[in-house]
Image (cartoon, helix red, strand yellow):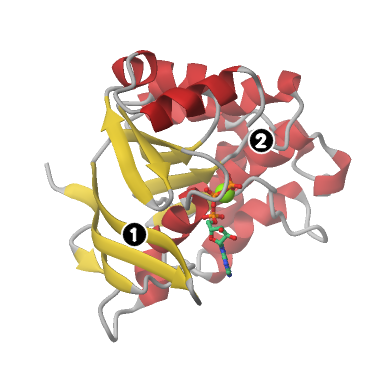
Amino acid sequence: MNPVIVISALTKRFGQTHVLRGIDLSVASGEVLVVIGPSGSGKSTLLRCMNLLERPSTGTVTILGKELTAKGVDLPDLRRNVGMVFQSFNLFPHMTVLQNVMEGPRTVLKMSDNDARDRAMSLLQKVGVEAHADKKPNKISGGQQQRVAIARALAMEPQVMLFDEPTSSLDPELRAEVLDVMRNLASEGMTMVTVTHEMEFARGVADRIIFLDEGQIVEEGEPNATLTKPTTERLRSFIQTVRWGLQ
Ligand SMILES: Nc1ncnc2c1ncn2[C@@H]1O[C@H](COP(=O)(O)OP(=O)(O)OP(=O)(O)O)[C@@H](O)[C@H]1O
Ligand SMILES: [Mg+2]
């Protein structure tokens, strides 16, 4: 099957800082890829390059056979295929939960209010927050807000979902509900790229894990083998840090 994302010889510099140093990566349709690595290793930058929230310094990003980095592409159109969920939920604070999820379908996809509402409500049901549809985001828990953020991204019917540490700002008891939603998405065949320190999730759900360090993919492979038998000292010591809760 054709890959959903192909990244080739990608580099990213901010001034003199070389953040990504030659990334080659391809994500297959239906694949769940987990990205791990120390703080500052370039994980968020890599994800942000996948939908051109950051423009790569060199190299190419291709989504569904179309090169995002090419000149003159219809970027908003290509971006629709890529849903993104951030560590901080980034919901519109002045809108209700329902309005947050309806907004993209209404304004970008030009759906009617009724159709956008139907789609939003069924997604809110899917992530288990339909009872809170009429509340403002600050009236619901962080776990609920993050599930709304997932529903909002799904409302655009993306071909791939990017998650950047979606549970890091949540209390432990709220993490499980977000991870459950992600687990369900994965089992439905959604293509997913997830930056996370949730090692149990990585071992249970990911098809592949990549370890990023200083802007390079240092190790990659099947999660269980990669995490239990790291071949580099860098990954070994990273796993120790995470295990002891320092990361
Ligand atoms: N807009 C920017 N301008 C300048 N430097 C940046 C910018 N964004 C990121 N960086 C730098 O790039 C490096 C990688 O940052 P990035 O956020 O991708 O790391 P990360 O692996 O996601 O880290 P964390 O685990 O802390 O989220 C860091 O040194 C960071 O300071
Ligand atoms: Mg980050």
| Residue drawn at x 69%, y 48% as measured from the top left | 89
Crowding at label 1, few (<14), some or many (≥20) Cα neighbours within 10 Å? some
| Residue drawn at x 13%, y 47% as measured from the top left | 2
Closer-to-camera residue (181/219): 219
Closer-to-camera residue (224/215): 215
User: Does the rendering let one see residue 164?
Assistant: yes
Q: Is residue 50 left or right of residue 86?
A: left
Give amino acid for label 1.
Arg
Residue 161 percent location from the top left of the image: 43, 46
Counting residues from the start of the chain, the first of labels 1 and 2 encountered is 1
Q: How many marks?
A: 2
Give residue 159's mark: none
Residue 79 percent location from the top left of the image: 40, 65
Give amino acid for label 2.
Ser
The residue positioned farthest toward the right in the image shown: 139
Q: Name the residue carrying label 1.
A: 21
| Residue drawn at x 51%, y 64% as measured from the top left | 111
The residue positioned farthest toward the bottom in the image shown: 72
Q: Is residue 8 left or right of residue 207?
A: left
Observer-side mark, 1 or 2, equals 1
Residue 128 percent location from the top left of the image: 64, 28
Q: Name the residue carrying label 2.
A: 168
